[in-house]
Structures are given as C-alpha cells and as structure tokens.
Amino acid sequence: MIYLLLSIASSAIIVVLFKYFEKYKVDLYYPIIINYFVASGLGLFLNDYKTGFYDVFHSNWIVFAIIIGTLLIAMFFVIGLSIQKAGITVTTVSSRMSLIIPITFSIIYYNESVGAVKVVGIVLAILAVLFSVMRKGQIKINQKYFYLPFLAFLGGGIIDSLVKYSQQEFLSFDNTALFSGILFTFSAVIGVFISLFKRTPIKSFIKPKILISGILLGIANFCSMLFFIKALANCKFESSIIFGFNHIGIILLSAVIALIVFKEKLSVVNKIGIVLSFLAIIILSNA
C-alpha cells in the first residue's frame, strides 16, 4: 500500500508543479523535455538490475518501453493542443476518465473479480473523477475538435494498460527502475528530435527557472511511474481497484493542496465529487 500512496503523492506533486508553471508563466515545452532526461537518468542510476545495454535492447520488455515512452510525450502534445482547441475542462475530464480503460482491461484480460461491491466502488470512483474536475457543473466542447479529448482519453488509458501488462508479464522488483528509466529515455530522445525539428535554441533550456522546473518535474514523474508499477506488483488489491484508488487519490490530494496553497474554491459539484471519492475509497477497500 505504501507504494500506491507514494505514487499518488508524486502524481499530486506533478499537478501542483503545473499550477506553479501556470502562475509563473513557465513555457511547459522546455521543462517537459528536461523532465524526461532527469527521469531517464534517475532510472538508470537507481537500477539494481545488473545488465548491459545489449541485454536491455534484447529484453522481452523493450518494445513496450519504446511504445510507452513514445506515447507519453505524444500525449503531452495532444493534451496541450486539446486544452487550446477543445477546452481545459473537457480535456481534463477526458484524460481523467481514461481510468475506465485499464480497469476494463484488468478485469477482462486478467479475469479479475467483478462483484457487486467492487462495481459500485468503481462506478463511484468514475463519478468522483467526473464531478471533481468539472467546472461550473457543465462541460462545453468545440465539436470541431472532439477528436482531441477523445485521443487524450484513449491515449491515457492505453498507457496505463500497457504499464499493467508490462508489470504483469515482464517486470520484477529489481528491473522496475531500469524499465522506467528506459521508457523515459525514449521520451527524451523523441523530445530531442522534436526540438531539432523546431530548431529550438539550446539557451532556451538552460534558463534557471526552466532548469529547476524540469528537474523537479522529472523527479516527481519518475517517482510516480516507479512507485505505481511497484504498487501494481505488491499491493494486496487487484489492479482494477488500484487504478481507481490511484485516480481518486490524486484528485483528493491535489484538491487539498489547491485549497491550502492556492486558495482555490470548490463548486458544489466539485464538493460532491470529493464526497464520492471518500465513499469510493471506503467501498473499494472492502471489495
């Protein structure tokens, strides 16, 4: 359970960092690229699985590391574009609601239990996510760009499902850090190619504010991935429950931090979402 809590805390820190980036007008593109290098370096440095690069690139999980690493950076641009074109609320809802995909995948592919209590808990978790991120009780979308939030929903769900599959089929306690480091390495490499294509000046990355933002984001991002994989492997709950716990836990902790640090006000709908989150946690804990 400790790994799940650490993963939730790390993910909540990422949310808080993005709020600070917005407050201090930090261009997200540069910290995101730096973040992947930091996360990659941490994974390779903390690796307990003694193996060479030849063995890594001939491992049975390398293809999944490449796919997940590619999807991670691709989803950053999709979500960014979706926020601009389709709206922040519908994008946030879509990306958060993606938990439906890995929950369904875990139940169907790994034959996890589907009792009445568990179903109620999962439904409450989904409603909690929906209500917690809605603004002014409604969701508006520019229908011309409907495909963007849909891609955010689909991409987030596929990433979580692939992480679950990789953990279940290929990973051990020892090579989790290596797997995380390698997938972030591919994200970083793709980021470099994008920067070269955009002809981004190197000096844009070495400003103190950008460097600090990228380093903090990279540490939190790596910890979130590492601890979540370990939670899937070691937590007493089934993975379909862990996905629900993870999403509502991030929302609850982020909401608390936002209230205390940023003095954000919650709407009635958001408060209902928080209450549903607590109910979902209680029910899922006994599923």
Image: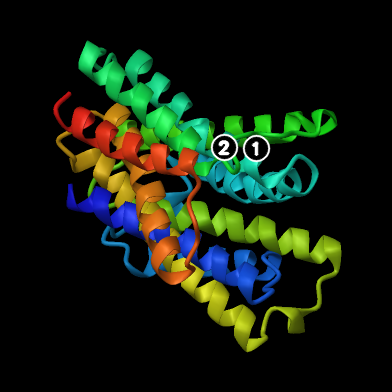
Residue at point 39%, 67% (across, down): 260
> Image height check: is 201 above or below 99?
below
Residue 178 in sight here: no
* Residue of label 2: 93
Where residue 170 sits in the image (x, y, percent)? 33, 36
| Nearer the observer, 93 or 261 | 261
Q: Position of residue 222 (x, y in %)?
A: 42, 60
Residue 204 is labelled as none
Type of amino acid at the residue the image marks with label 2: Val
Horizontal side of 279 relative to 263 (left or right) equals left
Q: Residues within 10 Å of mark 2 (few under 14, many from 20)?
A: many
Name the amino acid, label 1. Answer: Val
The residue lying furthest to the front in this view is 268
- The CA span between labels 2 and 1 is 5 Å
Residue 280, image x, y percentages: 28, 32
Residue 131 lies left or right of residue 107; in this view the side is right
Residue drawn at x 81%, y 78% as measured from the top left: 201
**Callout 1: SS:** helix
| Residue 24 image offset from top left, x and y in percent | 64, 77
Q: Secondary structure at mark 2?
A: helix
| Residue named by callout 1 | 90
Let me know if residue 210 appears in the view: yes
